[in-house]
Image: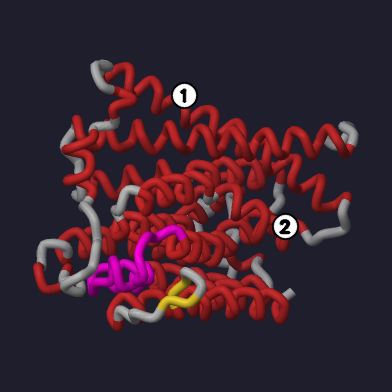
Amino acid sequence: MGNLSLPILIIIFLLSAVVIWLAGVSLAKATDTIDTRFRLGDALGGLILLGIAGSLPEIAVVTSAAIKGHYEVIIGNLIGSVSIKTLALILFDFLAKGKKPLSYLAGSTILAMEGLLSIIIVAIAIFGIKATPNVSFAGISPTSLMIGLAWILGLFVIDRLRLIKKLNLTAEDALPGRKHHERRAVENHAFFKGKTTSHVILIFALACLATLVAGFALEETGTTLAGAWGISAGLFAATILSLITAFPEISAGIESVIIGDHQLSISDIFGGIAFVPVIFILADLISKEPILPYATDKDALLAILGIVMVAIFSISFILKPKIRIMRLGVDSIMVFVIYIVGLILIF
């Protein structure tokens, strides 16, 4: 695409972003229906399906970048997604109805545990940035394998913790909304009412394909545009690309908040944050060498920034603050300010 004019590249980039948003909506509906019909619900299988389906744009971008050797795009997109996805909680907080912030409406210890899992996985990724690149197993970094193992074990633990009633307790006047299995058992998405399971799976597959194709185009045009505008490919990937690849989770989260499923909107974001670093395994496999050791100190600082942002919300889900200023909780305001200041200091 390097031979195309700048306006054409911008159009392709924007069209790819639109496709990712629209395909993400269909993907979310199809995923919900598949979960319902195969009775996956909040179980481990459902959480794995959610994590992978919601992160397909990142998978596409990373695959394209790995094939071309654009390591800075891989690292920027996966590390930057942590803070960008966390920023989505600020939008959800603003959209939440009533006088109480989102952290009060949905806050519970189980959400804090999900945030802690995300923090642990990102911390392992930071370790990989500083670890020696000389060791690998079939081209996969031991750190990437540790991330994958931590994700699977973490999902298993969270799945068990959800069964402990006291960890799910919210404030008396809170509005956490339904859990995954409760929402899907009722809705099964009217969009697929009367449709066969084969039809739903076909829609799921087509949405996946559209997302992957758009993701490839997004990475190619995005990298070219970043170079044309004199922007670091890593910075562009950590901000603009990360925002667009988070569209499926943001759109699903907006829908959840609007209908009052506040806890689901947060849980799905944390699930996406925890899964994104797992994609380094795919990047290592395609590149045939560990990717994380190529990260810079700025990438490590960006990952630490993401950890701080997740930690603030996780603590808030336990403390459940009631104060809301201009439709935002104190936690959202803190996270937004920290992100902007952190980004300025890092880049």
Residue 193 location, x and y as percent? 26, 21
Q: Residues within 10 Å of mark 2 (few under 14, many from 20)?
A: many
Q: Residues within 10 Å of mark 1 (few under 14, many from 20)?
A: some
Is residue 126 left or right of 33 when viewed as pictured?
right
Q: Is residue 111 magenta?
A: yes
Secondary element at tag 2: helix
Q: Is residue 313 above or below residue 257?
A: below
Total tally of numbered discs in the picture: 2
At x 34%, y 64%, the residue is: 150
- Quarter occupied by residue 53: top left
Query: In the image, what residue type sits under mark 2?
Result: Phe
Q: Is residue 263 magenta?
A: no
Q: Main secondary structure of the magenta part?
A: helix
Instruction: Identify the residue under disc 1.
Output: 206
Residue 236's label in the rendered image is 2
If the image is split into quadrants, where does the N terminus sit? Answer: top right
Q: Which of the two residues, 19 or 289, is positioned nearer the viewer here?
A: 19
Q: Which of the two residues, 187 or 312, is positioned nearer the viewer here?
A: 187
Residue 274 location, x and y as percent? 40, 61
Query: In the image, what residue type sits under mark 1?
Result: Leu
Q: Is residue 44 above or below residue 217?
A: below
Residue 70 location, x and y as percent? 71, 51
Q: Are marks 1 and 2 in contact (CB under 8 Å)?
A: no
At x 74%, y 74%, the residue is: 347
At x 60%, y 48%, the residue is: 244
Is residue 227 left or right of 151 when viewed as pictured?
right
First to last magenta residue range: 95-117
Give me the C-alpha separation between circle 1 and circle 2: 28 Å
